[in-house]
Amino acid sequence: MSFLEAMQWRYTAKKYNSAEKLDSVYIEELKEVLRLAPSSINSQPWRFSFVSDAELKKTLAEASLFNAPKVLDCHTIVVFSRIDSIEAFEKQITMHLPEGAVGYYNQFLKQLPESELKAWFDKQVYLALGVLLSACAEMRIDATPMEGIEAAKYNTILGNEEHHALVAVAIGYRHEEDANQPNKNPKRRIPLDEVVQSI
């Protein structure tokens, strides 16, 4: 299957088959995929929490608004959190990044207001989100990105002290009755010539 075919196959699952489990090998591969995700200056201002424990998923479901059924029925929830402590971020890049990257941060980013710097962190996390969704498609794993979560409650449940939850992704296998499957509800996309400019 080509990557294009994988993207044609994928869709946002609305209903999961709770009886069908993901192989642990796939979970470990997805963890490594996220570790390798790109970020500006290799900043990596993130944490990825893989939650498969049924009781913990139940607790997260209670903080997932209209997404609760997906959280309960999918195999695993992957929570994407951005680093929330500027001090912790600066310590991290000093420990792990080369001098040039740290210099770029100090020259161009450090002086930004905290809200703008955290918005920059958020953008890096969403790059990783795209990588996960693409990897799942290539692996024929269904995935549902969900911003409909109560972030503060997620932080408490996950014990986030220096990170802040932004988005969660349900992963697993679609239920045969999911009405959002492309064979039941064809994908709707804006025509290519309206979204892609060739010069």
Image: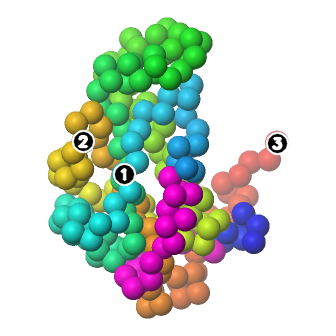
Q: Is residue 101 left or right of residue 191?
A: left
> Which numbered disc flags the more N-terminal residue, 3 or 2?
2
Q: How did the renderer colour the structure?
A: rainbow
The residue tagged with tag 3: helix, strand or loop? loop
Q: Residue at x 27, y 71 (%)?
A: 54
Q: Which residue was labeled with disc 2?
A: 160
Amino acid type, residue under disc 1 in the picture: Ser
Residue 25 falls within the magenta-colored stretch: yes
Closer mark to the observer between disc 3 and disc 1? 1
Visible in this render: residue 38?
A: yes
Q: Residue at x 58, y 43 (%)?
A: 36
What's the residue type where badge 2 is placed? Answer: Asn
| Residue at disc 1, secondary structure | strand
Given the current orientation, which residue lies at the most extreme bottom position?
A: 177
Q: Is residue 88 above or below residue 166?
A: above
Mark 3 vs 1, N-terminal side = 1
Label 3 belongs to which residue? 199
In this picture, which residue range is highlighted in magenta?
9-31
Which secondary structure lies at badge 2? loop
Q: Residue furthest front?
A: 25
The relative height of residue 155 versus residue 9 in the rendered view (above or below) is above
Q: Residues within 10 Å of mark 1 (few under 14, many from 20)?
A: some
Residue ID at (39%, 85%): 19
What residue do we see at 57% from left, 43% from top? 37
- Name the amino acid, label 3: Ile
> Is residue 77 depicted above or below 100 in this figure?
below
